[in-house]
Amino acid sequence: AGIYLSRMDERYECQYSSRRFITPAINKFKIVLDTKDAHQDFQTVGGQYNVTFNPADSTITFDLIGEYPWHDNCYVVGSIINVNGEKHRWKNDEMAPIAHKGNGIYEGEVVFFRDSVENWYPNFTIFSCRSNTGSIEHSTATRSGWNEGRYGNDENKLILEDGVPMGDLIRGSDRKWYMNWDEENEEPTQTYRITFDMNHNTVVINGGSNGDVNADGDVTIADGVAVLNAMAGQEVPGNADVNGDGEVTIADFVAVLNIMAGQ
């Protein structure tokens, strides 16, 4: 929405082009007169709001009425391994969904590989939405210069350290993150749990088991058996939730087989 005050030919907009997305936690913004016809409109996924303009400090506040309509998933795209254990980098049809856990927090495990195009850094970004396969050429992930739903930081290619949150994210710019992969780690892939807080604009990565459920250093059929054991209620040394959906099911057994196939 644009904001019109005093006269219909005076149009006010958000002061910052990449920090204008309304969430329950981020709802107060500086506004400026739109003198360049830039149209930096405020954005949200929906909802009903009480809107308060304070002319003393040129701010506008959007107070949510009721529930915020969070999407069911956000999407990770980058140097990822798909569900068939194959390498895919930066393809709209291979986005990895991370599920909404509540209050704007999205989380899931994603398998990455070393990316030779990016100096061997695994890398990714997060999109709040995706196109269907029939409109990939118009997708925010693949269409050059169209990044409305894409998250990153002001600086491109920042390295995310394991377990250390990165905050003050921006939305709508061409950015990506790197993961600092230890050179002594010779594994072909690495699983990270991605936690993205769309409400507070933060992201954090945590290294996962990479399918090594029995924690013996390799991903073999023994890890598939360990998944089955975990399904039966037995304790296992590693993480049996290989696909990161919050449950241990036959899908995790299949995920182990897919990781084996991609090695």
Image (cartoon, rainbow, N blue to C red):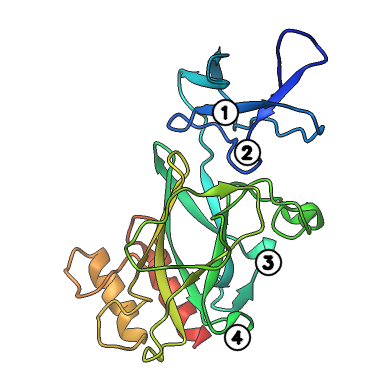
The numbered mark, 4 or 2, whose residue comes first in the sequence reads 2
Q: Nearer the viewer, residue 78 or 12?
A: 12
Residue denoted by label 1: 30
The residue at the far top in this view is: 6
Q: What amino acid is labelled 1 in the image? A: Lys
Check disc 4 and report its element: helix, strand or loop: helix
The x, y position of residue 117, in whole percent, is 64, 82
Check disc 1 and report its element: helix, strand or loop: strand
The x, y position of residue 33, in whole percent, is 72, 24
Label 4, label 1: how far apart the Cα atoms are:
42 Å
Left/right of residue 214 with respect to residue 10 in the rendered view: left
The numbered mark, 2 or 1, whose residue comes first in the sequence reads 2
Residue denoted by label 3: 91
Q: What amino acid is labelled 2 in the image? A: Tyr
The x, y position of residue 92, in whole percent, is 68, 61
The numbered mark, 2 or 3, whose residue comes first in the sequence reads 2
Label 2, label 1: how far apart the Cα atoms are:
8 Å
Q: What amino acid is labelled 4 in the image? A: Ser
